[in-house]
Amino acid sequence: MNCERARELLAAELLNQLGPDERRDLDAHLASCESCRGEAQADRALWARLGELPAAGWSQAGRNGAQVALQQAIHAQASARRLPPWMAAAALAAAFLGGLSVPRSSLPWEQPQPDTGTAARPGEQEYMLVLLEAETLPGAPAPPPRVAEYSGWARSLAQRDRFAGGEKLRDEGGFVLTAAAQQDYTPAAGRISGYFMIYARTADEALALARESPHLKYGGTILVLPVDPI
Amino acid sequence: LAHPPDEVLMRRVRDGDLAQLETLWLRHAPAVHRYCARIASTEAADDLVQDVFLRVLRYRATWRGDGSFLGWLLRIARNTCHDHIESRRREENAMSIWRPDETAAEADPRLHLLQQALARLPEDRREVITLARWHDLPAERIAEVLGCSPGAVRVRLHRALRELRDILHAMEDPTP
């Protein structure tokens, strides 16, 4: 073994990656080479000293600030991809819908390209599932919380690469807007309570995915609408 | 191993489940901060770690899942630090803008000197020492971050240590 190889093995030793054969070869070389022995001693001492250097502290305030910024960016990304309102207007003429569509094109990450707004792969169609609430009869108990169940469904869609986005919509705080007037939106039976964006290869697959939704068992209705990218 | 594994979480992020990025943040933000503090500057590390994760969010569609998430993340951290250093270098016209954390090792003169020597080490040498010594990454993972072979990592580490020793010797004994 030459000295150059021995010094490479010394680095491997520091990386805890020296195999038994390499260990034996290195030890044999060090026993016979004074120069490499000195090098090994110096490298090992420096390595130990480097290990004593304290890491730079990260204040709790700094950590929290960065985490909040990330959360805001996640939220902004989710709401930046709003779908055009004509979709909702044409569907129901009752509410203004927001939307989320997450692109999943595979780009070299060093060269990000503008988001084109939709990301159905060849052979796939993006569908919007509009969730319409069942009528609540007067005096009936309030429906149980269902968000976790819907989230579980979303997760299951994502695991199969079928989930493009979705949100629950609030009942309050909305408006109905026309060119001539603006009025508060009043939720009523059949109102839109949320939507999902999914990818499917065929209309049958989109229907099958929609049938998995917990929404149906709660008496709701789902509009399964193919997206026409603009 | 953490469950679900990082790679599964990143795949979910790529596919639209953006909230999973918070779990990846909780797992790896301290390591990214440590890396940025060692490579760029301790003062800038808070901003840089944030920038790194924003880049993950922005470029999530490019995650191909054919390597380790940590390797990919540190590669983004590496580029982020590099961009920061380049922009500072243009501003300051200096060879290296890394400033050691003066408070961290001031109690021990030996460590203080080592900090100063590290500050004089070129960035690419400091990088391999950082990944190997303070991130405890195996040569394969370091190779993934640096874009070279594991064998080249050994050679680079050896050269970086020798250079650091030379700088230290020159600082400890400044007579020619």
Image (cartoon, coloured by chain):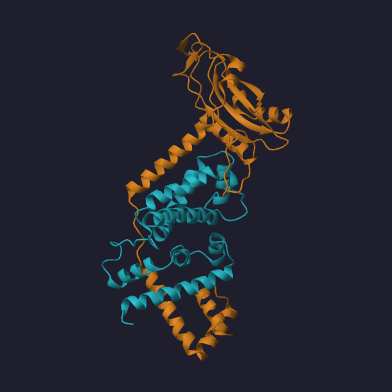
Chain colours: A orange, B cyan
Q: Residue furthest bottom?
A: A32
Quadrant location, the C terminus of chain A: top right
Q: Measuring from the top left, give residue A95's x and y in whole percent.
A: 53, 17
- The quadrant in which residue A204 appears is top right
Q: Is residue A21 visible?
A: yes
Q: Is residue A14 visible?
A: no
- The quadrant in which residue B149 appears is bottom right
Which one is nearer the viewer's eye here, A143 or A71? A71
Q: Measuring from the top left, give residue B7's x and y in whole percent.
A: 57, 50
Residue at (39, 70) in percent of width and height: A50
Residue at (50, 44) in percent of width and height: B21
Vertical position of residue B169 compared to residue A55: above or below: below
Does A124 sit left or right of A116 as displayed? right
Q: Measuring from the top left, give residue A167's x and y in whole percent.
A: 53, 29
Quadrant location, the N terminus of chain A: bottom right
Does B175 sit left or right of A180 as displayed? left
Q: Measuring from the top left, give residue A31's x and y in whole percent.
A: 50, 89
Q: Residue furthest left?
A: B107
How many numbered circles are shown? Answer: 0
Q: Residue furthest top?
A: A180
Vertical position of residue A113 compared to residue A172: above or below: below
Vertical position of residue B131 compared to residue B69: above or below: below
Which one is nearer the viewer's eye here, B163 or A182? B163
